[in-house]
Image: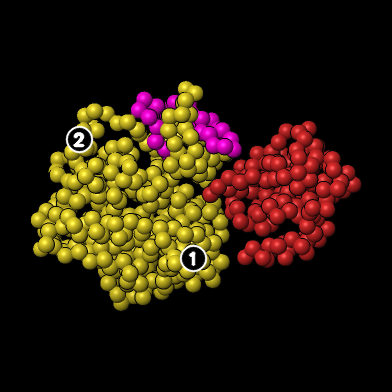
Chain colours: A red, B yellow
Amino acid sequence: MNIPEGLLYTKEHEWVKIEGALALIGITDYAQNSLGDITFVDLPEEGTEIKQTDTLATVESVKAASDVYMPLSGRVKKLNQDIVDAPEIVNQSPYEKGWFVAIDITDEAEKDSLMTASDYKNYVEGLA
Amino acid sequence: MEQTRLKQTPLFKLHDDLSAKFAPFGGWLMPIQYEGIIAEHNWTRESASLFDICHMGEFIIHGDAIGSGLDNIVTFNVSTLPLGSCKYGFMLNKEGGIIDDLIVYRLEQEKFMLVVNAATRCKDFNHIKSNLSTEATLDDISDHTAKLDLQGPVSRDVMTGFLGPNILALKYFSFLELTILNKKAIVSRTGYTGELGFEIYIDSEQALELWNRLLKSEKVRPAGLGARDTLRLEMGLPLYGQDISEDTTPLEAGLDRFVDFKKDFIGKDILLEQREQGLNKKLVSFISDTRRSPRHDDKIIAEKKEVGQVTSGSFSPSLGFGIGIGYVENGYDWLGLKIAVKNYRSELAAQITDKPFYKSGSARK
């Protein structure tokens, strides 16, 4: 299970990479592996404001559809159109090419509610 | 723990060693995927896949086709079934509802094998027992019978290489009884994928060795029930308990060709009535206009009203679109009708189409 250091994580298996007031968001290796082959990704429009824990995106695998939640409140600044056109990128590269959106963070304090890589690792191991 | 109550096939450990993902199915803990559903699906369409189908049930009936009551239990004619042939059809209740779908093999003039679903095995056994004459015998051989399916366009080459040229003569829905690994086995030209393929029945003790032998060919890879489900759905084949059940009749499911009205069978009266008076609901096939998929229990909307429900839906790896089947009210079953498929999360546009969705299957080649 790949859990890179330096990212922050949620219990719903999203990751966040913070760069100043910007955050890049995606789903974890654990998430893509549990979902199996991802066949469809539905992203919000650029400019949409979404609160922490509200639905950010929908991903469909062969077997089921699932929601991806917003790890931090923010405004969607940029979408990864590549994963809409070729959803398998999320399976192949969940932390790099398979990012979902970039957002402008609206509430810095919410970062405290996220897990570090080692916390998330313990959390995932507890799920087995 | 629920998992401790689920049954395991003789190949469970082997699947686990292959890092398969498991899920409960019909009371069994079954391998759903190894490498990935789409890869396994595509490999089955291009080459050949091996499936562990040991969960399914097998019964043996000794008795006259008609005198035993068997012919009356199923919707097709058993008395005219030639030796070495098998046939697909249904067992119905008195209301015409489907107790199970099954295949009957004529092993001898007065000996038959019935292959039934895992989840319905006990129910089927009791139903058959109570409708069988006292002279006939019924035995459940499932616990010591393994079933492995080899499916895909190159499966005949693989089987011929393993078992010899006898296999070449096997026609669609016929079978051979032969000796494999020093045990009696049955090989039929049947399957649930739409591809050229074989189903092998053998003593459970031989399952592991047979599995390993067939996988020796580079052309063969293991596939799980996940790919089996997308393969069968692309062919428009129903899954018992999901697309057909005791609440649906073969006519509502559009499976008329597996019902022989020239003979008697339990439930026939209701089917005749339905045929005369028309159906209240009809199973239809539909294709999404995107990669987004219809899902089980989604609502079907036509002309702005709810007209039905999705029973099976998935992304179609072969077509690259979402596909589904489901029941709609009478009058909303015509080809080309534009529908919407809706759940709490989203709504997608789809169109009623004919089946199979995938039209290049090699099953009859």
Give the magenta range. Answer: B323-350
Screen quadrant of the N terminus of chain A? bottom right
Against B143, residue B252 (above or below) is: above
Query: Residue B177, image x and y in percent?
Result: 25, 66
Residue B272 image label: 2
Label ID, residue B3:
1
Give the quarter of the figure containing the C terminus of chain A. Answer: bottom right
Residue B243, disc: none
> Is B97 situated above or below A7?
above
Circle nearer the N terminus (2, 1): 1
Chain assignment, label 2: B
> Residue shown at 48%/53% (left/top)?
B227
Residue in view at x 36 percent, y 54 percent: B191
Q: Position of residue A120 (x, y in %)?
A: 74, 61
Residue positioned 53% across, 64% down in the render: B20
Q: Quadrant of residue B331?
A: top left
Closest to the observer, B63 or A11: A11
Mark 2 → mark 1, Cα distance in angstroms: 44 Å
